[in-house]
C-alpha cells in the first residue's frame, strides 16, 4: 500500500504516511491534518506535490477552508519540503516492520494515546511508534520527566537515581530520553526500584541511540515500560529531532525536573517546553562552582523552576490537590523557640555561671525591670532559668549538654 492507495478514511495509514513525510514539529502539516483530516490532507498534499501550479491549489484550498489562512503563505514552501518523500511512502511496509518488532502505532483517538499531547496543538506528533506496553497513557497518567545533561557528574547521576527510585516507590512513571548521563541514570533508578519508565527517542524505535544504551532500553521493555518515537522505523536521530523530541517529553509528563544541566544544555529545551505548556518545572541545585549545574541555577534564579531536593518534593510539585503532600519535616527544636520576644531577649542575657540580679539583667537585655520580672517567671516555668541567691542564671547542664 503506497501513498496513492491509502483510503481517505484510513486514519492510521494516513498518519503513518505523514510521520515519514514530515519532520517532527511541522506546524503547517499539523494545521492541514487538523482541518482536513489525515487522509484528505494527504490526498491534497500529494496532488500539490505533483502540480506545476501549487499556488492555485493553495488558493482554492484556503478559499474552501478559511481556517487555513494563517498558514497560507507557508503551504507552498511546505509542499516543496514534502515532495521528495512521496515516492518512498509505504505505510504497510512500516506497519509490518513494527509488527516484526513486536510493537505498534498509536494515533489521536486510539486507546493508549497520551492525552497530554493535545496541548501541543498543530505541532503534536502525527502518531507514536511504540515498543513495549502499547497503552502508554495508563503509565503516563502519573508520570514525571527527569532530564539532564549527557556530560553528567557523579553527583547528578546519584541524585537522578535517588529521585527516580523514590518516584517508583510511589507508583510514578519516570519519563526521559534514553540518552547517556542523567537520562540513563533516571531510567536505571526507576528500574532498580521496580518501577515503570518510558523512553522517548529522537530516532526510530528499532535503532537504539546511543548504541551503548541498547541493553538499558531492553530492560525497560522487559520490566513493562515503553520505548516511543514519532519518527518512523529506521529514522536517524539528528540535532533538530532531539530538540523537537523534548516537547514530547514535556507534554506527556505531569511535571519536568531538570536534575543537572549546563548553561546551554538541551535539557533546558525540555524545561522551556514544559513552561510553555504550563506544566510545573523543578530544578535540582548543585555546587555553585559546577558548570554542570549552571542551567539549573539559571532556571531557579529566573523563577522558572521550583527548587527540589528529593522525591517527596518532586511529587508535591506535580501532585493533584490534596494528594502527594510531602511528609512534615522534623526540625531540631532549640531553647526559646516558643518564647515571646522579651523572654527570648532575657534568655540571651542570662549568664551561665555568675548570677545577675534584676537591675543588671535589665541593663544587659535592654528591658525594663518589670519586663525582666515577668520574663523570669516564664523562663523558670520552662526550666530555662534558675534562682541563685538574690540573682538568676541559666540551669546547670548535664554531661550530655541537656538540662538535668
Image (tube, helix red, strand yellow):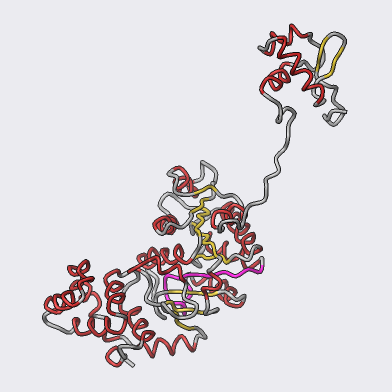
Q: Position of residue 145 (x, y in %)?
A: 51, 62
- Please check the rendered image and state whether residue 199 is part of the magenta-colored stretch, yes or no: yes
16 lies above or below 249: below
Position of 322 with respect to 381 (left or right) is left
- Where residue 158 sits: x, y (%)? 61, 55
Image mark count: 0
What residue is shown at x 33% (from left), y 83% (from top)?
Answer: 17
| Residue at the farthest top position | 359
Q: Position of residue 44 (x, y in %)?
A: 22, 82
Using residue 227 as the reference point, say whether residue 385 is left or right of it: right
Quadrant for residue 121, please give it: bottom left
Q: Measuring 58% from the left and 54% from the top, which residue is drawn there?
A: 316
In the image, residue 400 above or below residue 348: below
Q: Which residues are magenta?
A: 194-208
Query: Residue, x 43% and y 77% (percent of image)?
Result: 128
Counting from the top left corner in percent of width and height, residue 63 is at: 15, 75
Figure check: 376 above or below 182: above
Q: Is residue 55 magenta?
A: no
Q: Is residue 181 visible?
A: no
| Residue pictured at 38% horizontal, 63% vertical | 243
Provide the major secondary structure of the magenta segment: loop
Split into 4 quadrants, where in the image is the C terminus?
top right
Front residue of this view, candidates 54 and 212: 54
Which quadrant: the N terminus? bottom left
Nearest the camera: 25 or 207? 25
Classify residue 138 as left or right of residue 201: right
> Residue 77's image quarter?
bottom left
Q: Name the residue nearer the viewer: 210 or 349.
A: 349
Residue 72 visible in rendering: yes
Amino acid at each position: 500500500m503506497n501513498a496513492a492507495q491509502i483510503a481517505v478514511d484510513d486514519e492510521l495509514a494516513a498518519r503513518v504516511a505523514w510521520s515519514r513525510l514530515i519532520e517532527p514539529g511541522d506546524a503547517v502539516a499539523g494545521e492541514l491534518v487538523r482541518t482536513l483530516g489525515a487522509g484528505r490532507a494527504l490526498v491534497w498534499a500529494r496532488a500539490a506535490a505533483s502540480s506545476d501550479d501549487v499556488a492555485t491549489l493553495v488558493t482554492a484550498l484556503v478559499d474552501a477552508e478559511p481556517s487555513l489562512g494563517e498558514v497560507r503563505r507557508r503551504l507552498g514552501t511546505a509542499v516543496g519540503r514534502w515532495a521528495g518523500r512521496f515516492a518512498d511512502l509505504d505505510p504497510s511496509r512500516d506497519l509490518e516492520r513494527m509488527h516484526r518488532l513486536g510493537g505498534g502505532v498509536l494515533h489521536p483517538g486510539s486507546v493508549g494515546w497520551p492525552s497530554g499531547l493535545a496541548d501541543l496543538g498543530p505541532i503534536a506528533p502525527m502518531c507514536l511508534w511504540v515498543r513495549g506496553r502499547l497503552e502508554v497513557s495508563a503509565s503516563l497518567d502519573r508520570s514525571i520527566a527527569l532530564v539532564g545533561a549527557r556530560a553528567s557528574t557523579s553527583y547528578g547521576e546519584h541524585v537522578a537515581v535517588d529521585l527516580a527510585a523514590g518516584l517508583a516507590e510511589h507508583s510514578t512513571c519516570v519519563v526521559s530520553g534514553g540518552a547517556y548521563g542523567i537520562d540513563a541514570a533516571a531510567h536505571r533508578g526507576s528500574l532498580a526500584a521496580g518501577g515503570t519508565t518510558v523512553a522517548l527517542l529522537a530516532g526510530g524505535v528499532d535503532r537504539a541511540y546511543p548504541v551503548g544504551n541498547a541493553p538499558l532500553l531492553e530492560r525497560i521493555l522487559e520490566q513493562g515500560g515503553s520505548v516511543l518515537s514519532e519518527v518512523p522505523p529506521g529514522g536517524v536521530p539528528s540535532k533538530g529531532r532531539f530538540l523537537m523530541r523534548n516537547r514530547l517529553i514535556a507534554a506527556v509528563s505531569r511535571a519536568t525536573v531538570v536534575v543537572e544541566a549546563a548553561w546551554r544544555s538541551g535539557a533546558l529545551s525540555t524545561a522551556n517546553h514544559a513552561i510553555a505548556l504550563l506544566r510545573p518545572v523543578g530544578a535540582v541545585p548543585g555546587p555553585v562552582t559546577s558548570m554542570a549545574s549552571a542551567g539549573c541555577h539559571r532556571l531557579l534564579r529566573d523563577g522558572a523552576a521550583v527548587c527540589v531536593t528529593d522525591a517527596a518534593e518532586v511529587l508535591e510539585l506535580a501532585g493533584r490537590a490534596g494528594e502527594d503532600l510531602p511528609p512534615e519535616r522534623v526540625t531540631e527544636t532549640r531553647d526559646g523557640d516558643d518564647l515571646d520576644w522579651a523572654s527570648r531577649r532575657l534568655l540571651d542575657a542570662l549568664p551561665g555561671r555568675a548570677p545577675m540580679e534584676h537591675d543588671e539583667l535589665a541593663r544587659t537585655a535592654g528591658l525594663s525591670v518589670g519586663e525582666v520580672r515577668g520574663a523570669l517567671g516564664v523562663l523558670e516555668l520552662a526550666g530555662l532559668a534558675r534562682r541563685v541567691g538574690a540573682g538568676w542564671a541559666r540551669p546547670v547542664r548535664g554531661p550530655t549538654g541537656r538540662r538535668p
